[in-house]
Amino acid sequence: VTADPEPAPEPEAPRPLPRFNTGPSFSARLVTSMEETSTPEEIAAGTPVVTSAVPFAAGALDRLGAYRIGPLAAVVDGVGGLCGGLAVLPRWVVTSDITLRTMAAARVGPLHCEARVLRAGRTSVVAEVTVVDRGADDLSVAVALVTSAALEPAGGPPRWERPVVLRDRRAHPSPDADVPLLEWMGARPRRWGGVELDLGPELLNPWGILHGGVTTTLVDEAAARAVADVTGRPAVATSMSLGFLAPGRKGPITAVGRLAGPLVEGVEAVARVEVRDTGADDRLLSVALVTVRP
Amino acid sequence: VPDAAADPAVPPARSPYPPDRHVLRDLQVTGIHRDGRRWSEIPVVPAILEHDGAPSTGVIGILVDIAAGSTAITAAIPDWCATASLDLRLQRLPADHGRLRAEASVLRKGSTTVVLEVVVTDALVCDGQAGPCAWSSLIFSIMPRRAGNLTVRDEEGEFAMGLAQSGFSTTFAAGVGLEVLDAATGHVALPITDEARNSFGALQGGLHAVVADAAAAALGAQLLGAPVRTTDLAITYLAQGKVGPVATRAVPLRIDAGTALVRVEVRDEGTGRLMSIATATTATRVPAPTPSPSPEPPGAPT
Protein backbone atom coordinates (compact mmCIF):
# COMPACT_ATOMS: atom_id res chain seq x y z
CA VAL A 1 0.00 0.00 0.00
CA THR A 2 1.35 3.35 -0.95
CA ALA A 3 0.22 6.29 1.07
CA ASP A 4 0.89 9.87 0.11
CA PRO A 5 2.72 11.23 3.13
CA GLU A 6 1.86 14.81 2.28
CA PRO A 7 -1.87 15.35 1.84
CA ALA A 8 -2.43 16.48 -1.71
CA PRO A 9 -4.01 19.87 -2.16
CA GLU A 10 -7.57 20.20 -3.34
CA PRO A 11 -7.77 20.57 -7.11
CA GLU A 12 -7.56 24.19 -8.09
CA ALA A 13 -10.84 26.00 -8.39
CA PRO A 14 -11.73 25.93 -12.06
CA ARG A 15 -11.67 28.92 -14.33
CA PRO A 16 -14.35 29.57 -16.95
CA LEU A 17 -14.21 27.03 -19.71
CA PRO A 18 -12.59 27.88 -23.01
CA ARG A 19 -14.48 27.22 -26.20
CA PHE A 20 -15.33 23.60 -26.84
CA ASN A 21 -12.78 21.54 -28.78
CA THR A 22 -10.99 24.45 -30.39
CA GLY A 23 -7.49 23.00 -30.38
CA PRO A 24 -5.75 19.67 -30.89
CA SER A 25 -7.03 18.57 -27.50
CA PHE A 26 -7.51 15.10 -26.10
CA SER A 27 -11.28 15.60 -25.83
CA ALA A 28 -11.57 16.71 -29.43
CA ARG A 29 -10.31 13.33 -30.59
CA LEU A 30 -13.16 11.52 -28.87
CA VAL A 31 -16.30 13.65 -28.63
CA THR A 32 -18.05 15.71 -31.28
CA SER A 33 -20.91 17.09 -29.21
CA MET A 34 -22.30 17.38 -25.73
CA GLU A 35 -25.83 18.56 -25.44
CA GLU A 36 -28.14 19.25 -22.54
CA THR A 37 -31.42 17.52 -23.27
CA SER A 38 -33.08 18.53 -20.01
CA THR A 39 -36.62 19.77 -20.00
CA PRO A 40 -37.25 23.22 -18.49
CA GLU A 41 -38.66 21.39 -15.47
CA GLU A 42 -35.48 19.34 -15.10
CA ILE A 43 -33.35 22.47 -15.39
CA ALA A 44 -35.45 24.20 -12.74
CA ALA A 45 -35.23 21.16 -10.49
CA GLY A 46 -31.44 20.98 -10.83
CA THR A 47 -31.57 17.50 -12.36
CA PRO A 48 -30.03 18.06 -15.79
CA VAL A 49 -29.65 15.43 -18.49
CA VAL A 50 -26.68 15.60 -20.85
CA THR A 51 -26.06 13.49 -23.93
CA SER A 52 -22.97 13.10 -26.03
CA ALA A 53 -22.17 11.79 -29.51
CA VAL A 54 -18.99 9.76 -29.82
CA PRO A 55 -17.73 8.88 -33.31
CA PHE A 56 -16.07 5.53 -33.74
CA ALA A 57 -12.47 6.67 -34.09
CA ALA A 58 -10.22 3.79 -35.05
CA GLY A 59 -7.53 5.13 -32.76
CA ALA A 60 -9.68 4.33 -29.74
CA LEU A 61 -10.28 0.69 -30.67
CA ASP A 62 -8.50 -2.44 -29.51
CA ARG A 63 -6.99 -5.06 -31.82
CA LEU A 64 -10.38 -6.79 -32.11
CA GLY A 65 -12.12 -3.60 -33.16
CA ALA A 66 -13.89 -2.85 -29.89
CA TYR A 67 -13.88 0.57 -28.22
CA ARG A 68 -11.36 0.49 -25.36
CA ILE A 69 -12.43 1.15 -21.79
CA GLY A 70 -9.83 3.88 -21.26
CA PRO A 71 -11.18 6.30 -23.88
CA LEU A 72 -14.69 5.22 -22.93
CA ALA A 73 -14.00 6.34 -19.37
CA ALA A 74 -12.65 9.59 -20.79
CA VAL A 75 -15.94 10.22 -22.57
CA VAL A 76 -17.93 9.24 -19.50
CA ASP A 77 -15.83 11.61 -17.39
CA GLY A 78 -16.63 14.50 -19.72
CA VAL A 79 -20.35 13.97 -20.06
CA GLY A 80 -20.82 13.02 -16.40
CA GLY A 81 -18.79 16.00 -15.31
CA LEU A 82 -20.76 18.47 -17.41
CA CYS A 83 -24.01 17.03 -16.11
CA GLY A 84 -22.81 17.22 -12.52
CA GLY A 85 -21.54 20.74 -12.99
CA LEU A 86 -24.86 21.97 -14.35
CA ALA A 87 -26.58 20.44 -11.33
CA VAL A 88 -24.55 22.45 -8.81
CA LEU A 89 -24.38 25.83 -10.57
CA PRO A 90 -23.20 28.45 -9.61
CA ARG A 91 -20.56 26.12 -8.25
CA TRP A 92 -18.56 23.93 -10.62
CA VAL A 93 -16.99 20.50 -10.40
CA VAL A 94 -13.88 18.41 -10.75
CA THR A 95 -14.20 14.64 -11.03
CA SER A 96 -13.19 12.77 -7.91
CA ASP A 97 -13.92 9.20 -8.96
CA ILE A 98 -15.32 7.05 -11.76
CA THR A 99 -16.70 3.53 -11.64
CA LEU A 100 -17.23 2.12 -15.13
CA ARG A 101 -18.52 -1.33 -16.07
CA THR A 102 -18.73 -2.58 -19.62
CA MET A 103 -21.72 -4.69 -20.58
CA ALA A 104 -20.81 -5.56 -24.16
CA ALA A 105 -18.12 -4.75 -26.68
CA ALA A 106 -18.87 -1.66 -28.78
CA ARG A 107 -17.91 -2.64 -32.31
CA VAL A 108 -20.01 -0.52 -34.69
CA GLY A 109 -20.56 3.01 -33.43
CA PRO A 110 -21.18 5.82 -33.12
CA LEU A 111 -21.68 5.69 -29.37
CA HIS A 112 -24.30 7.66 -27.51
CA CYS A 113 -23.88 8.64 -23.86
CA GLU A 114 -26.55 9.93 -21.52
CA ALA A 115 -25.84 11.34 -18.06
CA ARG A 116 -28.37 11.94 -15.29
CA VAL A 117 -27.80 13.32 -11.82
CA LEU A 118 -28.59 10.91 -9.01
CA ARG A 119 -27.65 13.18 -6.12
CA ALA A 120 -26.41 16.76 -5.88
CA GLY A 121 -25.18 17.67 -2.41
CA ARG A 122 -23.31 20.51 -0.77
CA THR A 123 -19.86 19.19 -1.57
CA SER A 124 -20.36 16.53 -4.21
CA VAL A 125 -22.57 15.41 -7.07
CA VAL A 126 -23.14 11.93 -8.48
CA ALA A 127 -24.14 11.33 -12.10
CA GLU A 128 -24.98 8.04 -13.74
CA VAL A 129 -23.88 7.65 -17.36
CA THR A 130 -25.16 5.01 -19.76
CA VAL A 131 -23.50 4.25 -23.08
CA VAL A 132 -25.13 2.55 -26.07
CA ASP A 133 -23.80 1.59 -29.49
CA ARG A 134 -26.08 3.44 -31.92
CA GLY A 135 -24.91 1.36 -34.85
CA ALA A 136 -25.72 -1.91 -33.10
CA ASP A 137 -29.40 -1.24 -32.42
CA ASP A 138 -28.61 0.77 -29.31
CA LEU A 139 -26.80 -2.13 -27.69
CA SER A 140 -26.06 -1.26 -24.05
CA VAL A 141 -22.31 -0.98 -23.84
CA ALA A 142 -21.46 0.44 -20.43
CA VAL A 143 -22.78 2.02 -17.27
CA ALA A 144 -20.80 4.37 -15.06
CA LEU A 145 -21.09 6.46 -11.94
CA VAL A 146 -19.15 9.72 -11.95
CA THR A 147 -18.69 11.47 -8.60
CA SER A 148 -17.46 15.05 -8.68
CA ALA A 149 -16.44 17.52 -6.00
CA ALA A 150 -18.40 20.77 -6.09
CA LEU A 151 -16.17 23.82 -5.80
CA GLU A 152 -16.50 27.59 -5.71
CA PRO A 153 -14.55 28.69 -8.81
CA ALA A 154 -12.33 31.68 -8.12
CA GLY A 155 -13.33 33.33 -11.38
CA GLY A 156 -16.96 32.35 -11.15
CA PRO A 157 -18.63 29.40 -12.83
CA PRO A 158 -18.58 28.80 -16.58
CA ARG A 159 -21.19 30.99 -18.24
CA TRP A 160 -23.68 28.72 -19.93
CA GLU A 161 -26.75 29.41 -21.98
CA ARG A 162 -29.27 26.76 -21.00
CA PRO A 163 -29.90 24.29 -22.35
CA VAL A 164 -26.20 23.87 -23.09
CA VAL A 165 -25.24 22.80 -26.61
CA LEU A 166 -21.57 22.17 -27.39
CA ARG A 167 -20.75 21.12 -30.93
CA ASP A 168 -17.41 20.67 -32.58
CA ARG A 169 -17.83 22.31 -35.97
CA ARG A 170 -14.65 20.90 -37.46
CA ALA A 171 -14.71 18.07 -39.91
CA HIS A 172 -14.79 14.61 -38.33
CA PRO A 173 -13.06 12.31 -38.30
CA SER A 174 -9.85 14.28 -38.05
CA PRO A 175 -7.12 13.36 -40.58
CA ASP A 176 -5.17 11.44 -37.94
CA ALA A 177 -8.17 9.80 -36.25
CA ASP A 178 -6.82 6.35 -37.07
CA VAL A 179 -3.61 6.95 -35.16
CA PRO A 180 -3.84 4.88 -31.98
CA LEU A 181 -4.75 7.13 -29.09
CA LEU A 182 -1.78 6.03 -26.99
CA GLU A 183 0.57 6.79 -29.86
CA TRP A 184 -1.03 10.21 -30.40
CA MET A 185 -0.64 10.91 -26.68
CA GLY A 186 3.04 10.02 -26.91
CA ALA A 187 2.72 7.15 -24.45
CA ARG A 188 5.64 4.75 -24.37
CA PRO A 189 6.33 1.51 -22.50
CA ARG A 190 8.38 1.78 -19.33
CA ARG A 191 11.39 -0.44 -18.83
CA TRP A 192 9.98 -1.89 -15.59
CA GLY A 193 6.40 -2.26 -16.75
CA GLY A 194 3.55 0.14 -17.37
CA VAL A 195 3.58 3.21 -19.60
CA GLU A 196 4.66 6.84 -19.38
CA LEU A 197 4.25 10.07 -21.29
CA ASP A 198 5.39 13.66 -21.29
CA LEU A 199 2.80 16.27 -20.45
CA GLY A 200 2.06 18.37 -23.53
CA PRO A 201 -0.59 21.10 -23.77
CA GLU A 202 -2.93 18.86 -25.77
CA LEU A 203 -3.09 16.49 -22.78
CA LEU A 204 -4.33 19.12 -20.34
CA ASN A 205 -7.93 19.79 -19.41
CA PRO A 206 -9.49 23.27 -19.47
CA TRP A 207 -8.09 23.91 -15.99
CA GLY A 208 -4.54 23.37 -17.21
CA ILE A 209 -3.91 20.06 -15.43
CA LEU A 210 -3.59 16.48 -16.68
CA HIS A 211 -6.81 15.54 -18.48
CA GLY A 212 -8.80 12.92 -16.60
CA GLY A 213 -9.31 11.04 -19.86
CA VAL A 214 -5.57 10.80 -20.40
CA THR A 215 -5.37 9.24 -16.96
CA THR A 216 -8.09 6.67 -17.71
CA THR A 217 -6.45 5.80 -21.03
CA LEU A 218 -3.09 5.24 -19.34
CA VAL A 219 -4.73 3.18 -16.59
CA ASP A 220 -6.45 0.96 -19.17
CA GLU A 221 -3.14 0.30 -20.92
CA ALA A 222 -1.16 -0.26 -17.74
CA ALA A 223 -3.73 -2.75 -16.41
CA ALA A 224 -3.84 -4.69 -19.67
CA ARG A 225 -0.05 -4.81 -19.77
CA ALA A 226 0.13 -6.05 -16.17
CA VAL A 227 -1.84 -9.13 -17.21
CA ALA A 228 -0.30 -9.53 -20.67
CA ASP A 229 3.20 -9.43 -19.19
CA VAL A 230 2.32 -12.57 -17.21
CA THR A 231 0.31 -14.49 -19.80
CA GLY A 232 2.21 -13.42 -22.89
CA ARG A 233 -1.13 -12.73 -24.60
CA PRO A 234 -3.03 -9.46 -25.16
CA ALA A 235 -5.57 -8.67 -22.43
CA VAL A 236 -8.66 -6.46 -22.32
CA ALA A 237 -9.81 -4.31 -19.40
CA THR A 238 -13.54 -4.67 -18.76
CA SER A 239 -14.21 -2.52 -15.70
CA MET A 240 -12.47 0.30 -13.93
CA SER A 241 -12.81 2.03 -10.60
CA LEU A 242 -10.56 5.06 -10.42
CA GLY A 243 -10.00 7.80 -7.88
CA PHE A 244 -8.42 11.13 -8.78
CA LEU A 245 -6.19 12.12 -5.88
CA ALA A 246 -4.12 15.07 -7.06
CA PRO A 247 -3.65 17.15 -10.20
CA GLY A 248 -0.84 16.30 -12.63
CA ARG A 249 1.10 19.37 -13.66
CA LYS A 250 4.66 18.53 -14.73
CA GLY A 251 5.30 15.03 -16.00
CA PRO A 252 6.52 12.65 -17.13
CA ILE A 253 3.38 10.85 -16.03
CA THR A 254 3.67 7.13 -15.32
CA ALA A 255 0.98 4.46 -15.01
CA VAL A 256 2.08 1.14 -13.55
CA GLY A 257 -0.17 -1.84 -12.96
CA ARG A 258 0.37 -4.87 -10.78
CA LEU A 259 -1.78 -7.96 -10.53
CA ALA A 260 -3.68 -7.75 -7.26
CA GLY A 261 -4.26 -11.46 -6.96
CA PRO A 262 -3.72 -14.84 -8.56
CA LEU A 263 -4.17 -15.33 -12.27
CA VAL A 264 -6.47 -18.27 -12.94
CA GLU A 265 -7.36 -19.65 -16.35
CA GLY A 266 -10.85 -18.59 -17.37
CA VAL A 267 -11.26 -16.04 -14.58
CA GLU A 268 -10.92 -12.27 -14.97
CA ALA A 269 -7.94 -10.79 -13.15
CA VAL A 270 -7.75 -7.59 -11.11
CA ALA A 271 -4.92 -5.13 -11.57
CA ARG A 272 -4.13 -2.22 -9.28
CA VAL A 273 -2.76 0.76 -11.17
CA GLU A 274 -0.94 3.79 -9.80
CA VAL A 275 -0.56 6.97 -11.83
CA ARG A 276 2.24 9.28 -10.72
CA ASP A 277 3.75 12.60 -11.70
CA THR A 278 7.45 11.78 -11.66
CA GLY A 279 8.37 15.41 -12.24
CA ALA A 280 6.56 16.47 -9.09
CA ASP A 281 8.28 14.30 -6.47
CA ASP A 282 6.58 11.22 -7.85
CA ARG A 283 3.25 12.49 -6.56
CA LEU A 284 0.50 9.89 -6.57
CA LEU A 285 -2.21 11.23 -8.91
CA SER A 286 -4.63 8.30 -9.20
CA VAL A 287 -5.21 4.78 -7.99
CA ALA A 288 -7.42 2.39 -9.91
CA LEU A 289 -8.68 -1.16 -9.57
CA VAL A 290 -9.21 -2.62 -13.03
CA THR A 291 -10.78 -5.93 -14.02
CA VAL A 292 -8.92 -7.47 -16.95
CA ARG A 293 -9.91 -10.36 -19.18
CA PRO A 294 -6.75 -12.34 -19.99
CA VAL B 1 -13.30 3.21 15.66
CA PRO B 2 -15.15 5.88 17.56
CA ASP B 3 -13.95 6.07 21.14
CA ALA B 4 -11.81 3.05 20.44
CA ALA B 5 -8.25 4.20 20.56
CA ALA B 6 -7.50 4.62 24.20
CA ASP B 7 -4.73 3.50 26.51
CA PRO B 8 -5.17 -0.26 26.55
CA ALA B 9 -4.16 -0.30 30.20
CA VAL B 10 -7.18 1.79 31.10
CA PRO B 11 -10.50 0.27 30.05
CA PRO B 12 -12.43 3.02 28.28
CA ALA B 13 -15.86 4.03 29.40
CA ARG B 14 -18.47 2.25 27.28
CA SER B 15 -19.13 4.30 24.17
CA PRO B 16 -22.76 5.15 23.38
CA TYR B 17 -22.10 3.54 20.00
CA PRO B 18 -22.48 0.79 19.14
CA PRO B 19 -25.20 -0.31 21.60
CA ASP B 20 -24.77 -3.63 23.40
CA ARG B 21 -26.81 -5.47 20.80
CA HIS B 22 -25.30 -4.51 17.46
CA VAL B 23 -24.06 -6.22 14.32
CA LEU B 24 -20.53 -4.89 14.86
CA ARG B 25 -20.46 -6.44 18.32
CA ASP B 26 -21.93 -9.70 17.02
CA LEU B 27 -19.20 -9.82 14.38
CA GLN B 28 -16.74 -9.21 17.23
CA VAL B 29 -14.96 -6.44 15.40
CA THR B 30 -11.67 -5.40 16.97
CA GLY B 31 -10.12 -2.11 15.95
CA ILE B 32 -6.36 -1.82 16.36
CA HIS B 33 -4.08 1.20 16.02
CA ARG B 34 -0.48 0.22 16.58
CA ASP B 35 2.88 1.52 15.37
CA GLY B 36 1.15 4.03 13.12
CA ARG B 37 -0.91 1.34 11.35
CA ARG B 38 -4.66 0.86 11.61
CA TRP B 39 -6.67 -2.24 11.01
CA SER B 40 -9.85 -4.01 12.02
CA GLU B 41 -10.29 -7.74 12.50
CA ILE B 42 -13.07 -10.26 12.88
CA PRO B 43 -12.92 -13.95 13.69
CA VAL B 44 -14.03 -16.26 10.88
CA VAL B 45 -16.98 -18.13 12.38
CA PRO B 46 -19.45 -20.52 10.70
CA ALA B 47 -22.24 -17.92 10.81
CA ILE B 48 -20.51 -15.71 8.21
CA LEU B 49 -19.61 -18.44 5.72
CA GLU B 50 -21.30 -18.72 2.33
CA HIS B 51 -22.18 -21.81 0.31
CA ASP B 52 -18.56 -22.10 -0.79
CA GLY B 53 -17.31 -22.28 2.78
CA ALA B 54 -15.68 -18.83 2.80
CA PRO B 55 -16.70 -15.60 4.57
CA SER B 56 -19.41 -13.70 2.72
CA THR B 57 -18.52 -10.77 0.51
CA GLY B 58 -21.06 -8.63 2.33
CA VAL B 59 -19.43 -9.27 5.70
CA ILE B 60 -16.06 -8.40 4.18
CA GLY B 61 -17.75 -5.17 3.08
CA ILE B 62 -18.68 -4.42 6.68
CA LEU B 63 -15.13 -5.09 7.82
CA VAL B 64 -13.67 -2.91 5.10
CA ASP B 65 -16.11 -0.09 5.82
CA ILE B 66 -15.41 -0.08 9.56
CA ALA B 67 -11.64 -0.25 9.03
CA ALA B 68 -11.68 2.61 6.54
CA GLY B 69 -14.30 4.56 8.48
CA SER B 70 -12.37 4.58 11.73
CA THR B 71 -9.25 5.70 9.86
CA ALA B 72 -11.11 8.36 7.89
CA ILE B 73 -12.83 9.75 10.98
CA THR B 74 -9.50 10.12 12.71
CA ALA B 75 -8.04 11.82 9.63
CA ALA B 76 -11.01 14.20 9.53
CA ILE B 77 -10.72 15.37 13.15
CA PRO B 78 -12.23 17.76 14.22
CA ASP B 79 -14.84 17.12 11.53
CA TRP B 80 -16.84 13.97 10.93
CA CYS B 81 -17.34 11.86 7.82
CA ALA B 82 -19.55 9.29 6.13
CA THR B 83 -18.99 6.68 3.43
CA ALA B 84 -19.49 8.08 -0.08
CA SER B 85 -18.32 5.13 -2.14
CA LEU B 86 -16.95 1.64 -1.60
CA ASP B 87 -15.31 -0.59 -4.20
CA LEU B 88 -14.40 -4.10 -3.10
CA ARG B 89 -12.55 -6.61 -5.29
CA LEU B 90 -12.12 -10.17 -4.11
CA GLN B 91 -8.92 -11.79 -5.33
CA ARG B 92 -9.65 -15.28 -4.10
CA LEU B 93 -11.75 -17.11 -1.56
CA PRO B 94 -10.77 -16.10 1.97
CA ALA B 95 -9.83 -18.83 4.42
CA ASP B 96 -12.58 -20.54 6.42
CA HIS B 97 -10.66 -20.20 9.67
CA GLY B 98 -8.58 -17.79 11.67
CA ARG B 99 -9.21 -14.05 11.45
CA LEU B 100 -9.94 -11.61 8.65
CA ARG B 101 -7.97 -8.39 8.84
CA ALA B 102 -8.64 -5.14 6.95
CA GLU B 103 -5.82 -2.60 7.05
CA ALA B 104 -6.64 0.92 5.91
CA SER B 105 -4.34 3.61 4.54
CA VAL B 106 -5.22 7.18 3.69
CA LEU B 107 -4.30 7.97 0.07
CA ARG B 108 -5.50 11.55 0.20
CA LYS B 109 -7.12 13.81 2.73
CA GLY B 110 -8.66 16.95 1.24
CA SER B 111 -11.04 19.54 2.62
CA THR B 112 -14.15 17.64 1.48
CA THR B 113 -13.12 14.00 1.14
CA VAL B 114 -10.83 11.32 2.49
CA VAL B 115 -9.72 8.66 -0.01
CA LEU B 116 -8.53 5.36 1.43
CA GLU B 117 -7.33 1.99 0.34
CA VAL B 118 -7.89 -1.20 2.32
CA VAL B 119 -6.09 -4.51 1.99
CA VAL B 120 -7.86 -7.59 3.35
CA THR B 121 -5.79 -10.51 4.55
CA ASP B 122 -6.57 -13.82 6.26
CA ALA B 123 -4.97 -16.77 7.98
CA LEU B 124 -3.37 -17.93 4.74
CA VAL B 125 -1.50 -14.65 4.45
CA CYS B 126 -0.33 -15.01 8.02
CA ASP B 127 0.99 -18.48 7.14
CA GLY B 128 2.72 -17.16 4.03
CA GLN B 129 0.57 -19.34 1.79
CA ALA B 130 -1.16 -16.62 -0.24
CA GLY B 131 -1.39 -12.94 -1.05
CA PRO B 132 -4.21 -10.62 0.08
CA CYS B 133 -7.72 -11.96 -0.44
CA ALA B 134 -9.30 -8.58 -1.30
CA TRP B 135 -8.56 -4.95 -2.08
CA SER B 136 -10.90 -2.07 -1.55
CA SER B 137 -10.93 1.64 -2.27
CA LEU B 138 -13.27 3.98 -0.44
CA ILE B 139 -14.15 7.66 -0.37
CA PHE B 140 -15.55 9.34 2.70
CA SER B 141 -17.25 12.75 2.62
CA ILE B 142 -16.10 15.13 5.32
CA MET B 143 -18.91 16.89 7.17
CA PRO B 144 -18.84 19.55 9.86
CA ARG B 145 -18.99 18.05 13.34
CA ARG B 146 -22.45 18.24 14.81
CA ALA B 147 -23.80 17.86 18.30
CA GLY B 148 -24.22 14.16 18.88
CA ASN B 149 -21.22 13.05 16.86
CA LEU B 150 -19.02 10.71 18.87
CA THR B 151 -15.80 11.82 20.45
CA VAL B 152 -12.76 10.33 18.72
CA ARG B 153 -9.26 10.12 20.13
CA ASP B 154 -6.31 9.66 17.82
CA GLU B 155 -4.35 7.42 20.14
CA GLU B 156 -2.86 3.98 19.73
CA GLY B 157 -4.59 1.02 21.33
CA GLU B 158 -6.97 -1.84 20.79
CA PHE B 159 -10.73 -1.86 21.08
CA ALA B 160 -12.72 -5.07 21.02
CA MET B 161 -16.41 -4.52 20.30
CA GLY B 162 -17.53 -8.05 21.13
CA LEU B 163 -19.24 -8.53 24.47
CA ALA B 164 -19.89 -11.72 26.38
CA GLN B 165 -23.35 -12.06 24.87
CA SER B 166 -22.29 -11.08 21.31
CA GLY B 167 -22.38 -13.47 18.37
CA PHE B 168 -24.81 -15.21 16.07
CA SER B 169 -26.91 -18.15 17.15
CA THR B 170 -27.80 -18.97 13.54
CA THR B 171 -26.44 -17.47 10.34
CA PHE B 172 -25.31 -13.89 9.91
CA ALA B 173 -28.13 -13.30 7.41
CA ALA B 174 -30.77 -14.58 9.82
CA GLY B 175 -29.18 -12.62 12.63
CA VAL B 176 -29.60 -9.29 10.86
CA GLY B 177 -33.01 -10.22 9.45
CA LEU B 178 -31.93 -10.40 5.81
CA GLU B 179 -34.50 -12.08 3.57
CA VAL B 180 -34.39 -12.92 -0.13
CA LEU B 181 -37.97 -12.35 -1.28
CA ASP B 182 -37.61 -12.78 -5.04
CA ALA B 183 -34.35 -13.92 -6.62
CA ALA B 184 -35.52 -13.16 -10.17
CA THR B 185 -35.79 -9.44 -9.40
CA GLY B 186 -33.03 -9.35 -6.81
CA HIS B 187 -35.58 -8.36 -4.19
CA VAL B 188 -33.95 -8.57 -0.77
CA ALA B 189 -35.32 -7.02 2.42
CA LEU B 190 -33.57 -5.90 5.60
CA PRO B 191 -35.15 -4.16 8.59
CA ILE B 192 -33.37 -1.08 9.95
CA THR B 193 -33.09 -1.98 13.60
CA ASP B 194 -30.97 -0.37 16.28
CA GLU B 195 -28.59 -3.29 15.81
CA ALA B 196 -27.97 -2.21 12.23
CA ARG B 197 -27.60 1.56 12.60
CA ASN B 198 -24.48 3.70 12.46
CA SER B 199 -23.76 6.53 14.86
CA PHE B 200 -25.99 8.84 12.76
CA GLY B 201 -28.93 6.51 13.34
CA ALA B 202 -28.92 5.41 9.70
CA LEU B 203 -28.22 1.98 8.21
CA GLN B 204 -24.54 1.17 8.78
CA GLY B 205 -22.54 1.60 5.56
CA GLY B 206 -21.30 -1.96 5.47
CA LEU B 207 -24.84 -3.26 5.55
CA HIS B 208 -25.44 -1.57 2.20
CA ALA B 209 -22.77 -3.98 0.98
CA VAL B 210 -24.54 -6.87 2.66
CA VAL B 211 -27.90 -6.24 0.97
CA ALA B 212 -26.29 -5.43 -2.39
CA ASP B 213 -24.24 -8.62 -2.17
CA ALA B 214 -27.31 -10.67 -1.30
CA ALA B 215 -29.40 -9.15 -4.10
CA ALA B 216 -26.66 -9.59 -6.68
CA ALA B 217 -25.97 -13.17 -5.63
CA ALA B 218 -29.66 -14.06 -5.66
CA LEU B 219 -30.13 -12.75 -9.18
CA GLY B 220 -26.75 -14.04 -10.34
CA ALA B 221 -27.55 -17.57 -9.20
CA GLN B 222 -30.87 -17.38 -10.98
CA LEU B 223 -29.24 -16.19 -14.20
CA LEU B 224 -26.38 -18.68 -14.15
CA GLY B 225 -28.30 -21.63 -12.75
CA ALA B 226 -25.79 -22.34 -10.00
CA PRO B 227 -24.71 -20.88 -6.67
CA VAL B 228 -22.54 -17.81 -7.11
CA ARG B 229 -20.21 -15.62 -5.12
CA THR B 230 -20.05 -11.83 -5.46
CA THR B 231 -16.48 -11.23 -6.55
CA ASP B 232 -16.58 -7.48 -6.81
CA LEU B 233 -18.91 -4.84 -5.57
CA ALA B 234 -18.92 -1.08 -6.24
CA ILE B 235 -21.35 0.98 -4.17
CA THR B 236 -22.13 4.67 -4.43
CA TYR B 237 -23.97 6.02 -1.41
CA LEU B 238 -26.71 8.51 -2.18
CA ALA B 239 -28.84 8.97 0.96
CA GLN B 240 -29.11 7.72 4.50
CA GLY B 241 -31.74 5.12 5.31
CA LYS B 242 -33.34 5.70 8.69
CA VAL B 243 -36.83 4.23 8.48
CA GLY B 244 -36.75 0.96 6.60
CA PRO B 245 -37.24 -1.71 5.70
CA VAL B 246 -34.52 -1.65 3.08
CA ALA B 247 -35.50 -3.23 -0.24
CA THR B 248 -33.39 -3.97 -3.27
CA ARG B 249 -34.06 -4.41 -6.95
CA ALA B 250 -31.47 -5.92 -9.27
CA VAL B 251 -31.18 -6.14 -13.04
CA PRO B 252 -28.61 -7.98 -15.15
CA LEU B 253 -26.12 -5.89 -17.11
CA ARG B 254 -23.97 -8.62 -18.65
CA ILE B 255 -23.95 -12.41 -18.61
CA ASP B 256 -20.88 -14.38 -19.65
CA ALA B 257 -19.82 -17.95 -19.12
CA GLY B 258 -19.90 -18.33 -15.35
CA THR B 259 -20.28 -14.66 -14.49
CA ALA B 260 -23.12 -12.16 -14.30
CA LEU B 261 -22.73 -8.41 -13.90
CA VAL B 262 -25.67 -6.97 -11.97
CA ARG B 263 -26.91 -3.48 -11.04
CA VAL B 264 -28.60 -3.15 -7.67
CA GLU B 265 -30.71 -0.31 -6.31
CA VAL B 266 -30.99 -0.11 -2.53
CA ARG B 267 -34.02 1.80 -1.36
CA ASP B 268 -35.54 2.81 1.98
CA GLU B 269 -39.10 1.61 1.56
CA GLY B 270 -40.19 3.71 4.52
CA THR B 271 -39.32 6.93 2.72
CA GLY B 272 -39.02 5.78 -0.88
CA ARG B 273 -35.53 7.26 -1.07
CA LEU B 274 -32.82 5.67 -3.15
CA MET B 275 -30.06 4.96 -0.61
CA SER B 276 -27.35 3.55 -2.84
CA ILE B 277 -26.58 2.06 -6.21
CA ALA B 278 -24.27 -0.87 -6.65
CA THR B 279 -22.81 -2.84 -9.51
CA ALA B 280 -21.58 -6.32 -8.72
CA THR B 281 -19.98 -9.19 -10.54
CA THR B 282 -21.15 -12.62 -9.45
CA ALA B 283 -19.32 -15.76 -10.46
CA THR B 284 -19.78 -19.49 -10.20
CA ARG B 285 -16.03 -19.93 -9.92
CA VAL B 286 -13.59 -18.00 -7.75
CA PRO B 287 -9.82 -18.51 -7.54
CA ALA B 288 -8.69 -20.65 -4.65
CA PRO B 289 -5.75 -19.42 -2.60
CA THR B 290 -2.41 -19.63 -4.41
CA PRO B 291 0.86 -17.78 -3.96
CA SER B 292 0.82 -14.24 -5.27
CA PRO B 293 1.88 -14.22 -8.96
CA SER B 294 2.96 -10.62 -9.18
CA PRO B 295 6.50 -10.28 -7.88
CA GLU B 296 8.41 -7.10 -8.57
CA PRO B 297 10.55 -7.40 -11.70
CA PRO B 298 14.17 -8.15 -10.78
CA GLY B 299 16.02 -4.99 -10.07
CA ALA B 300 12.94 -2.83 -10.32
CA PRO B 301 13.27 0.51 -8.59
CA THR B 302 11.38 0.74 -5.33
Image (tube, grey):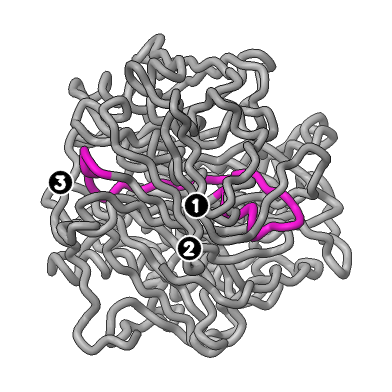
The residue under label 3 is which amino acid type?
Answer: Ala
| Residue occupied by mark 2 | B34
Q: Nearer the viewer, residue A182 or B39?
A: B39
Q: Are marks 3 and 1 on the same chain?
A: yes
Instruction: Calculate the distance from the C-alpha at mark 3 to the C-alpha at mark 1.
Output: 32 Å
Q: Residues within 10 Å of mark 1 (few under 14, many from 20)?
A: many
Tell me which segment is drawn in magenta. Answer: B69-98
**Of marks 2 and 3, the one in the foreground:** 2
For badge 2, the amino acid type reads: Arg
User: Label 1: which residue?
Assistant: B158
Identify the element where label 1 is drawn.
strand
The picture places residue B47, in percent across and down from the top left corner, at 31, 25
In the drawing, does residue B227 fall left or right of residue A17? left
Q: Position of residue B166 (x, y in %)?
A: 44, 26
Question: Which residue corresponds to mark 3?
Answer: B288
Query: Which badge, 1 or 2, is on the more N-terminal residue?
Result: 2
Residue A172 in sight in this render: no
Q: Are marks 1 and 2 in contact (CB under 8 Å)?
A: yes
- Residue in view at x 38 percent, y 10 percent: B182
Question: Chain letter of disc 3?
Answer: B
Q: CA distance from mark 1 to mark 2?
A: 8 Å
Q: Is residue B172 above or below residue A48?
A: above
